Image: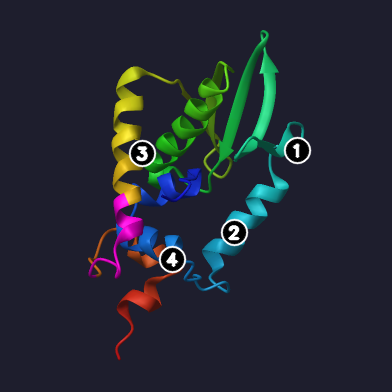
Amino acid sequence: MIDVTGTHIWYYFICQRELWLILHQIAADQEDENLDIGRFLSENTYQRNKKEVLIGNIKVDRVRKENGKLVIGEVKKTSRYLESARYQLLYYLDVLRQMGIDATGELLFPEEKKTEVVEWSIEAKQKLDHAISEIQQIAQKPVPAEPEKIKFCNKCAYREYCWAEG
């Protein structure tokens, strides 16, 4: 069994082929400009809050206290991947909850100047548990699923891997 991470949750909700590639340590195109933009945003936005804090086996982008409650933040370049971002953050909230820490989540979209509050719920936990189970199954497969054109392919750092003529 693999240890599922927030990154795995993120990719599960975007593209399960990409998830398989990541699970099998096949590197994306490191020169892809979308990766560069994501790194830049992570390093240069929301400077007032702590950045990338390791709590147990999770790494959250931002941490602060508000009215005595822990608020963890996840910075994303765009809200195009909203479901994926929500479940990644819900995964972090669930891990904290298992440690006895009650927290609230915030999705931060600096380029869009948007913030979305994310709260743990039983319904979200059920969907999260299902995703974790499927991620474990995907990890066991010997080959990735066949490529399937989806709306995220054009911005994907694996697009040449999936769509190169060869």
- Amino acid type of the residue that numbered disc 4 sits on in the rendered structure: His
Residues at circles 3 and 4 in contact by the CB criterion of under 8 Å? no
How many angstroms separate mark 3 from mark 4 (CA)? 24 Å
Residue 83, which numbered label? 3
The segment highlighted magenta reads: 137-146
Query: Where does label 1 land, which residue?
Result: 47
- The answer to which quarter of the image holds residue 31 is bottom right
Task: List x then y, in percent, for residue 164.
Answer: 33, 83
Assess disc 4: are there few (<14), some (14-19) or many (≥20) residues with their C-alpha within 10 Å of its C-alpha: some
Residues at circles 3 and 1 in contact by the CB criterion of under 8 Å? no
Q: Main secondary structure of the magenta part?
A: loop
Residue 37, which numbered label? 2
How many angstroms separate mark 4 from mark 1 (CA)? 34 Å
- Amino acid type of the residue that numbered disc 2 sits on in the rendered structure: Ile
Q: Earlier in the sequence, mark 3 or mark 1?
A: 1
Please state which of residues 150 and 127 is positioned toward the viewer in this rendering: 127
| 60 relative to 68, above or below | below
Query: Where does label 4 land, which residue?
Result: 24
Q: Is residue 140 magenta?
A: yes
- Amino acid type of the residue that numbered disc 1 sits on in the rendered structure: Gln
Task: List x then y, in percent, for residue 25.
Answer: 49, 67
Asked which colour scheme the image uses, the reply is: rainbow
Task: List x then y, in percent, for residue 137.
Answer: 29, 52
Q: Which of marks 1 and 2 is nearer the N terminus?
A: 2
Is residue 16 found left or right of 116 in the rendered image? left
Q: Earlier in the sequence, mark 4 or mark 1?
A: 4
Residues at circles 1 and 2 in contact by the CB criterion of under 8 Å? no
- Amino acid type of the residue that numbered disc 3 sits on in the rendered structure: Glu
- At a point 34% along the width and 52% down the height, the residue shown is 14
